[in-house]
Amino acid sequence: MLHAGRQLTTSFHAELYNLVPEEHLLRKIHCIVDFSFIHELVENSYCKYYGRPANEPELLFRLLFLQILYNLSDERIVQEAQVNLAYKWFLGINPEDPLPDASQLSRFRNHRLGASQVEDVLKQVVSQCVEKGLIKSKTIILDATHTQAGSQKQRPLDVLRDAAKRLLRAVVKRHPKLEKKLPALPRVKSEQEDAAQIMLHYLAKLGETVEELLPDHEGAISDKVQIAKQIVADERLLSHKGILSAIDPDARFAWKSQTKSFFGYKEHLAMSEEEIITAVVVTPGSNDDGKQLPLLLSQTRANGITVTEIIADTAYSGKDNLAEMKEESIQPVVPLNPVVHHGGERQGGFEYNKDADFVICPAGQHSTRKAMQGSKQSGKSRSLVFYFDVEKCKTCPLSEGCYKPNSKSKTYSIRIIAEHFKEQIEFELSDTFKERIKRRPIIEHKNAEMKRFHGMATAKYRGLFRMRIQTYLTAFVVNVKRMVKLVEQKQPALG
């Protein structure tokens, strides 16, 4: 049951709060940020008339704020707040008052914030920035960063075996009499060729049996059944490209660069030039960065920001993104992929004679005919393909590395730039583009801040649902910190 608010009694020990310095960060945050929005945000997740009185949502939300601000666990933040005067003052309780149990933080985070629209937490802080006149720029900067999963990457056989064991344990713990009715765990060895296939069939059968015996399953059993279903339905599992953890089935393997990989999630961010995060999209690690641009743009606008310019890296330069930005009258400060400029890797030594309209190979032979590839209606860049006389290629002294033996044709392609790229290529060569693209790296500092100081390097919880909560709360915290700095910059210096 949720009360409208908590009335604090005057305490004899309240004098102790005078020891908290006026310049303390938490005093500044309390004066600048209004946390009362959380009551309305979560009220529908509480029963209004029945049940035990609930802890005030603002108290629990402020505890979560402190937890992320100082990068502490649920247990540790409760322990620290119990003896830290600045923390207790910020929480709005008397020095001698007890704190909620650490388990209440998890319930509030998942069942109150998670059950509500956790995106509104970010929306509220952005709205407060707009109201205070802290966001004047109409530019957003886009980027993605990654978070390592809290669990280890596994082989398909281990994923299946662990999922089966976890489901078995959950059922037997709750319903020990059903143990004999469940299919026995098969004994398979890793070196068996069909080991993973055997475990896949077993996990599917086990999940079906549990649902037949316990049609009204809930709690831990329900969670394990859903994970089993998700794993069984993953067509990419056995090829080592799908689910790689029975504990965290939403996490995915992906590459950061040509040599570095990770296993976990991606956080796609939009940030104003004032360094206020305006939108967040959380995905499994394997998701494409560029496809998140429409979501980041719509979320930014929904949060009250007008956008006339987007600054981002090459990942966001797809034709669909360029088309949407053009339609929305947004200037894209986005470098195109080099393949658009140069048509990809070309064989050295081939030269196109524009006047004769043919290509001359390193051996001096010219192409015999040409053809156009690509549809006019597709909107993609088309290619002009030149064909050479294969009989001459077979006897050519330079054929090694140029002509593949027994190949029926030898071609050389020149990409024709699609119309939707031409305007962007011209803008990319301008001084305006070169100056504006220099602003892009500032979002990398924000990514580093979230990882280094606020626990975003590694997921604290499992699953995409909880990862989203962690990310939105962290974005709220770093925005609040930035608000304090921006407000201080606006205030005239005393002199």
Image: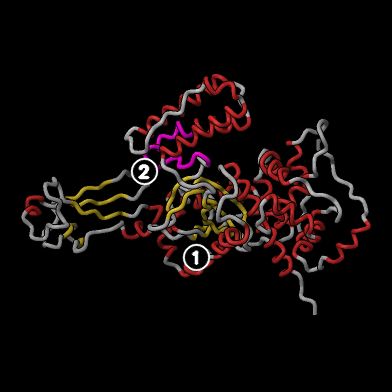
Is there any visible trace of residue 353 in the rendered image? no
SS category of the residue bearing label 1: helix
Quadrant containing the C terminus in the rendered view? bottom right
Q: Viewer-proximal residue, 429 or 234?
A: 234
Q: Residues within 10 Å of mark 1 (few under 14, many from 20)?
A: some
Cα separation between marks 2 and 1: 30 Å
Magenta-span inclusion, residue 241 = yes
Which numbered disc flags the more N-terminal residue, 2 or 1?
2
Residue marked by disc 2? 378
Residue picked out by circle 1: 437
- In the image, residue 156 lies in the stretch drawn in magenta: no
User: Label 2: how many residues lie within 10 Å, few (<14), some (14-19) or many (20+)?
Assistant: few
Residue at 28% x, 58% y is: 345
Q: Position of residue 304 (x, y in %)?
A: 66, 51
Secondary structure at numbered mark 2? loop
Which residue is drawn at the image coordinates 80% and 39% (left, top)? Answer: 54
Query: Is residue 461 visible to the viewer in this orientation of the structure?
Result: yes
User: Where does the image place residue 411, in percent across and percent down from the top left?
Assistant: 18, 51
Q: Residue at x 50, y 30 (%)?
A: 229
Q: Is residue 187 left or right of residue 94?
A: left
Residues 93 and 398: in front is 93
Tell which of 40 and 109 is nearer to you: 109
Horizontal and vertical percent position of residue 104 = 73, 43
Compared with residue 217, is residue 14 higher up or lower down, i.e. above or below?
Answer: below
Specify start and end residues of the magenta stretch as a single range: 230-247
Amino acid of disc 1: Ile
Mark 2 belongs to which amino acid? Ser
Judge left or right: residue 107 versus residue 142: right
Q: Is residue 431 left or right of residue 130?
A: left
Where the N terminus falls, by quadrant? Answer: top right
Residue 239 % position (x, y):
37, 39
Name of the residue lying farthest toward the bottom: 495
